[in-house]
Amino acid sequence: MHNKQLGDRGEALARQYLIKQGYQIITSNFRTPRGEIDLVARKDGVLIFIEVKYRTDLDQGHPAEAITKRKLQNLRAAIAQYLLDSERADFRPIKIDALCIIHLPGSEPVFEIFPDILGP
């Protein structure tokens, strides 16, 4: 499977999981010149930007290890653009989470949410 197909599969699993957990998905794949926001959701009155990392093996390490300093900088810039462009620009509070999914062959996917990856 190619990277785009893997990413699409991971985001589809993420959406299903988050909806079951009570999240309302607002949008996905919000793109800017600096980066992309995988998912934007709302839960309990909080606007949540979600970085999805999906792995079908651990050859390249845990999915969370793929969230680099540069990725976080680009994510921060994309979120700023989203808030400027969005009718929800005045919506507060917000937070930024990572959802890591490990889906090894022959097993069910394992989901792990890392809250507030940029800190409070």
Image (cartoon, rainbow, N blue to C red):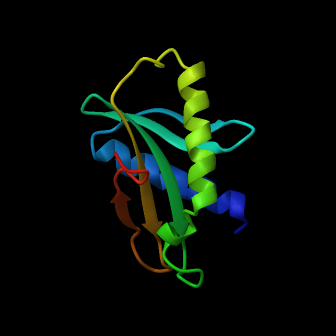
Q: Nearer the viewer, residue 71 or 37?
A: 71
| For residue 52, above or below residue 38 | below
Count of marks, rendered view = 0
The answer to whether residue 55 is left or right of residue 102 is right
The answer to whether residue 34 is left or right of residue 93 is right
| For residue 53, above or below residue 22 | below
Task: Locate residue 119, reporting x and y percent.
Answer: 37, 50
**Quadrant (top left, top right, bottom left, bottom right) of the C terminus:** top left
Q: Nearer the viewer, residue 94 or 28?
A: 94
Q: Residue at x 53, y 80 (%)?
A: 61
Task: Locate residue 91, reporting x and y percent.
Answer: 39, 21
Q: Residue at x 42, y 17 (%)?
A: 90
In which quadrant of the rendered view does residue 35 lie? Answer: top right
Q: Residue at x 58, y 85 (%)?
A: 59
Residue lying at the far top of the rendered structure = 87
Q: Nearer the viewer, residue 63 or 105?
A: 63
Q: Residue at x 39, y 71 (%)?
A: 108
The answer to whether residue 66 is left or right of residue 89 is right
**Quadrant (top left, top right, bottom left, bottom right) of the N terminus:** bottom right
Report whether residue 103 is seen: yes
Task: Locate residue 15, reporting x and y percent.
Answer: 45, 46
Residue lying at the far left of the rendered structure = 44
Report whether residue 29 is seen: no
